[in-house]
Amino acid sequence: MTKPRSATFMFAMAALTFCFAAVRADAAETYGELLGWGPTDKIVIFHSDDAGMSHSMNEGAMRGLTEGLVSSVSIMMPCPWVPEIVDFSRANPDYDFGLHLTLTSEWDIYRWGPVAGKPAVPGLVDAEGCLWDNVPLVVANATPDEIEAEIRAQIDRAETMGLTIGHMDSHMGTLFASIPFFRRYMKVGIEKQIPILVAGGHLTYARAENGDAVDLLGALAKSIWRAGLPVIDDLHTATYGWRDPAEKKENLIHFLRTMKPGITEVIIHCAVPNDVMPKITSSVNTRDADFRAMIDADVKRVVAEEGIILTNWKELMVRRKAAGDIASDVPIGGDSGSE
């Protein structure tokens, strides 16, 4: 049996509102423009999450990069199939591999614990010694110090294995569920100059999917930009709910035809199913459909017809450095829930 994700996933989607801060250095410009693209350019990151979770997820990510439209991948460092995807990353250094910072272990019979170890982060583990199986339990039990310790442990494991970390984001949105957690995520990203997921432009899809709450934490997003890290204009998170391959393809084509200028990340979960995958997760269909959409000839054709530019976080970071005006003393704030 696999654990239903509806409750925790919806919590995470609400929690993700913390990263959609509606701020720009100039209201007349998109972040795409601030990073050197033109005012009408439409730039997309097709971002495949959950690499390292299983061989199926790794194969979806690898083939999505080499055969399809996937331009960025993030890796779950506590998971058992990490060596395979890290080995692929070392052999393919031009691709963008980031850390899908993992603070939950949501499936029933396929689970993992913290990289830092239970003694170092006791508030992050359940009675089995695994990470909590949903976001509210992490918020209720973990401290900001434990969150930071586990973030640093996952970075350390990645660097020890030889992974070049192109960016960081958050599995199930856990780091966006608490302002103190977000500040620690932000602190480490700025300190190590690793891009972190944050959107703050026109937010068309972010608002449609999450409401006006996307305007929270504007000051922190502005600080992230001032500290030298890139910010994107919009974040599209709805694909997880599109389980039918035909629906997935149709909806993605509609998105590509109608998207606004600026940089939009589309979060997907590419997998190539095998006999084991259904024993891990009930989301096999939507993950398979993501992979199929990324290699679909019609979707590729629309990308070309619309003149859409594919990018990744590595390129965004290069462009952010080139844009200049980087402050060295950006305040991050403390661990209270207020600004």
Image: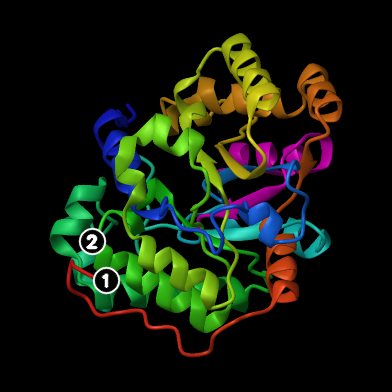
Residue on which the image places disc 1: 118
The amino acid pointed to by label 1 is: Lys
Residue drawn at x 46%, y 90% as measured from the top left: 329
> Which quadrant holds the C terminus?
bottom left
Residue drawn at x 53%, y 75% as measured from the top left: 226
Residue drawn at x 63%, y 68% as measured from the top left: 165
Report the colour scheme: rainbow
Crowding at label 2, few (<14), some or many (≥20) Cα neighbours within 10 Å? many
Q: Is residue 337 left or right of residue 296?
A: left
Residue 125's label in the rendered image is 2
- Image location (x, y in percent) of residue 130: 28, 56
- Image location (x, y in percent) of residue 210: 35, 35
Does dot 1 land on a helix, a strand or a loop? loop
318, 174: nearer the viewer: 318
- Image location (x, y in percent) of residue 287: 55, 28
- Quick check: can you spot residue 106? no
Give the CA separation, mark 1 to mark 2.
7 Å
Q: Which residues are magenta?
A: 54-76
Does dot 2 land on a helix, a strand or a loop? loop
To which quarter of the image does residue 314 belong?
bottom right
To which quarter of the image does residue 281 belong?
top left
Residue drawn at x 29%, y 56% as measured from the top left: 131
Q: Is residue 64 magenta?
A: yes
Looking at the image, is 21 positioned above or below residue 236?
A: below
Q: How many marks?
A: 2
> Which quadrant holds the N terminus?
top left
Give whichever of discs 1 and 2 has the lower sequence position.
1
Crowding at label 1, few (<14), some or many (≥20) Cα neighbours within 10 Å? some
Residue 241's label in the rendered image is none
57, 111: nearer the viewer: 57
> Is the C-beta separation of discs 1 and 2 under 8 Å?
yes
